[in-house]
Image (cartoon, helix red, strand yellow):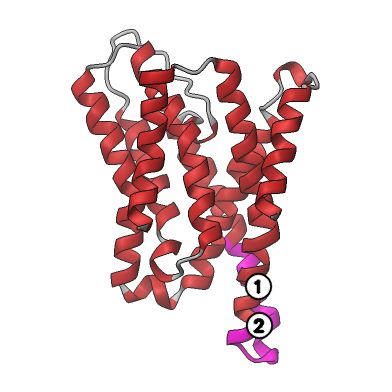
Amino acid sequence: MIYLFLVTSVLAGVLLVLIVKPKKRYIQLMLSFSGAYLLSMTISHLLPEAFGMLHAAHTHSHQEVDTKLIGIFILLGILIQLVLESFSKGAEHGHVHIHDKKKQFPWMLFCSLSLHAFSEGIPLGYDHNAFFLWAIVIHKIPVGIVLTSFFLKHKYEIKKVIFFMTAFAMMSPLGSFLASKIHFFQDYQNYITAIIIGIFLHISTVILFESSENHKFSFSKFFAILIGMAVALL
């Protein structure tokens, strides 16, 4: 069922573009909602859970050291996402900045986004956390919309577009599947989760910071952010 949700979230974004063809304004509102949800869920649920697992698993004498390590791995997740975005051109948070007149397929974009999606699915392999699952699902719908819109706008070959979106949809389920089978991911799940938290923090904050053009206040985007926060907290 987890795999189905992960794949469907990307396909939903593709179908919305092909059938509904949402305007840029509505895509921005969806991004604002997903960014607010992702940030609120990370701060209110994932962070307390990550430190709570340490408290339950370790003795008091080791807790301080492990807590510092969790913080270090969260920062590592932020750095990893910064590196990935240098290749994906910001597609994770709704902006694809690629100007290629030769219409060559952006393979660096494909590889970086696939790695990003793969890493998001890893925690679901050892911890069937509903907060993680819904955070990824809600995040991938607008990303699927942005990527599909980008490919159609630049008139890439339809076969390559289908291949990319299908592969992209399968990356998170693949990460989840391998994490459930390989003991390494389970043995170091606290620190792997911390890396994913860092990735989520970076993506969500960038989405929110870029949600307003020229730093102008928008009631509609502010309302979308409030709804995203409320849904995550509830």
Front one among 92 and 100: 92
Mark pair 1, 2: CA separation: 6 Å
Q: How many marks?
A: 2
In the picture provided, is 192 more to the left or to the right than 202? left
In the picture provided, is 72 more to the left or to the right than 21? right
Q: Is residue 167 above or below residue 79?
A: above
Q: Residue at x 58, y 57 (%)?
A: 197
Image quarter for residue 163? top left
Image quarter for residue 73? bottom right
For mark 2, give the secondary structure.
Answer: helix
Q: What amino acid is found at the position of numbered circle 1 in the picture?
A: Phe
Q: Is residue 86 visible?
A: no
Crowd tier of the residue under label 1, counting other residues whose Cα lies within 10 Å: few below 14, some 14–19, many 20 or above: some
Rendered image: mark on residue 55: 2
Q: Are marks 1 and 2 in contact (CB under 8 Å)?
A: yes
Q: Residue at x 67, y 42 (%)?
A: 228
| Residue 70 on the magenta segment | yes
Residue 112 locus on image (x, y percent)? 38, 39
Q: Which residues are magenta?
A: 55-73
Residue 118 locus on image (x, y percent)? 37, 51
Residue 145 locus on image (x, y percent)? 44, 27
Q: What amino acid is found at the position of numbered circle 2 in the picture?
A: His
For the N terminus, give its image quadrant. Answer: bottom left
Residue 167 locus on image (x, y percent)? 27, 40
Image quarter for residue 182? bottom left
Front one among 67 and 49: 49
Rendered image: mark on residue 51: 1
